[in-house]
Image: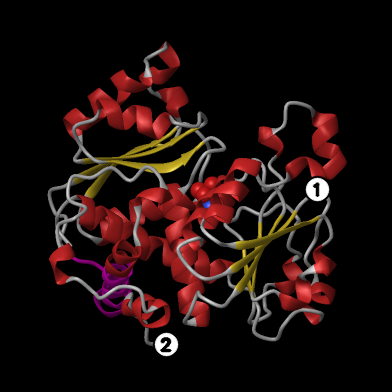
Amino acid sequence: MTFSGQMINAETKRLPFDAKHDGRFEGQHILSIGQFSLQDLVYIFDVAEEFRLMVRRVGALELLKGRILANLFYEPSTRTSSSFIAAMQRLGGTVIPINEVRYSSVSKGESLPDTIRTLESYADVIVLRHHETGSAALAAKYAHKPVINAGDGIGEHPTQALLDLYTILQERAKVSGLTITMLGDLKYGRTVHSLAKLLSLFDVKINYVSPEILRMPADLITHLDGKGIKQTQHTDLDAVLKETDILYVTRIQKERFSSETEYNSVKNSYVITPDTLAQAKPDMVLMHPLPRVGEISMEVDDDPRAAYFRQMEYGVYIRMALLALVLGKA
Ligand code: CP
């Protein structure tokens, strides 16, 4: 499929592509999805697309040779952590992987600011996942090198939102005009918080489907209302399944609940099965940031509408683009 960030321009008709954009991200932190304009998206997706084709052709470059990434994860991760490592290595750079802070000086009580000051002495860019909302912003306050937010508690996951939007473009070649349904844990789900904000740059309709106790935060809905985004809320997927173009499923996150009883009351609320897809549009796109713990049956993995494995591969190209951009090498 041919694709370019220019596609966003073509379908939104809102911005001319601006070559002067080069260098805009050099030395910048990536903390929140709200920092990106449509023009930024065009630029990032164009760079990601070049890297996607480059990986297919030659596998790796030496663009970031001599540069070092500190990959600092206070919370578990498979995709975000591994794809940032793969992205840095595909661009010729190297990585200090701290995937288990238990074995670092964090376990001796070292503060986040001191850990960041330490790692920036050794690395050129820091990727941070942390259990506290606002931790990436705190780290950026003390850092003199770019900090990239890889998920801060129940706050945001901006690089995931970028790869989610890139996936929608790859799968459907447009964003405006689509109806996106977000399903599952919308209260604690940082991926849906960031994605909803990002989609508000486009002319879309968003349906939220969740148990009552896991609704999308009211302040986020008000924020999108202010941008003219049509939104609906439901507890039953059947209410919106037939009109859905993108079904974005999320995990009910056990680790975010204070009570196991409360988690057990909602844990199996939704399961996507072949029967679900039988009622959906033939070109619906089924997405999930993963990991899944039963909310999408493995029986649907071979359905062409199941895009979640392609989605995680796209993450590498987006993260290659972000690393190259903040290091001034795109
Ligand atoms: N989507 C995502 O953030 O996955 P990981 O928790 O495995 O990084």
Residue appearing at x 30%, y 66% in the figure: 39
Identify the image quadrant of residue 58.
Answer: bottom left
Quadrant holding the N terminus: bottom left
Q: Which of the pair 111/39 is nearer the observer? A: 39
Amino acid carrying label 2: it is Met
Picture layout, residue 138 above or below residue 287: above
Please state the total of marks drawn on the protein image: 2
Picture layout, residue 229 above or below residue 301: above
- Looking at the image, tell me whether mark 2 or mark 1 is earlier in sequence order: 2
Residue 2 on image: x %, y %: 37, 87
Residue appearing at x 42%, y 12% in the figure: 109
Quadrant holding the C terminus: bottom left
Residue ID for mark 2: 1
Which label lies toward us, 2 or 1?
1
Q: Secondary structure at mark 1?
A: loop
Residue ID for mark 1: 211
Residue 141 on image: x %, y %: 28, 27
Label for residue 25? none
Q: Which residues are magenta?
A: 45-61
